[in-house]
Amino acid sequence: MLRRGAQQHEGATILAYPVSDPGRYGVIELDAAGRPLGIEEKPARPKSRHAVTGLYFYDNDVVRIAKSLVPSARGELEITDVNRSYLAAGKLRVIPLGRGHAWLDTGTHQSLLEASAFIATLEMRQGLKICCPEEIAWRMGYIDAGQLEALAKPLAGSGYGSYLLSLLSDGPV
């Protein structure tokens, strides 16, 4: 899904995830076909449960759009306003995430603790690291085995370095 979003060369692509408390987030309203209808930042009465995850893919028009922004009532430049510009132009695509995916917000102390516990549980259970940049780069072919080993060796005394080195002997997962 991320590759599909990154391959878009025109417009914007955002990811959306259903949450139980959408008023804490930017919220995207979708029609029955999954096309975006509206987008709001921290609405008092959300029109959907789909939070905007904060992962965006933009074409080069984003520079012009960002330069045109004015601070919101909160005194901030809002990414939601960038996304609204693409929506108004008919160039906003949404990739919905659902069952089988996990998007974790860490904007509060409680949500940071919950996310940490979730990640720790998965890593312990599976013996795999979550969002390990070196592993991703290696699996995607951005770096080769020699480069992975060179990155891992200085960290060999840590659990993280040991994990990276184990990838080379364990093979693909």
Image: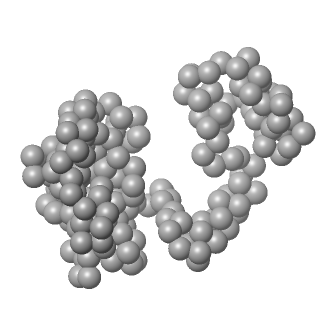
What is the basis of the colouring in this image? one colour
Outermost residue toward the bottom? 44
Q: Which residue is drawn at 53% across and 73% down?
A: 108
Decide: is 91 above or below 167. Answer: below
Residue shown at the point (71%, 25%) measured from the top left: 148
Corner quadrant of residue 143:
top right
Please tell me which residue is depicted at 34% across the width and 60% down the height of the picture.
52
Q: Where is residue 43 in the image (x, y as percent from the top left)?
A: 26, 76
Q: Which of 147 and 32 is in front in this view?
A: 147
Q: Nearer the viewer, residue 61 or 7?
A: 61
Determine the residue positioned at 33% across, 77% down. 23
Which image quarter is the C terminus in? top right
Q: How many marks?
A: 0
- Residue 115 falls in which quadrant of the image? bottom right
Residue 114 falls left or right of residue 30? right
In x, y percent, where is residue 95? Answer: 31, 50
Where the N terminus falls, by quadrant?
top left
**Residue 73: in sight, yes or no?**
yes
In the rendered structure, the answer to whether residue 53 lies left or right of residue 143 reads left
The residue lying furthest to the right in this view is 157
In the displayed structure, does residue 27 sit left or right of residue 147? left
Question: Residue 136, percent across and down?
Answer: 59, 34
Whether residue 157 sits left or right of residue 140 in the image: it is right
For residue 109, above or below residue 101 = below
Can I make out residue 166 in this image?
Answer: no
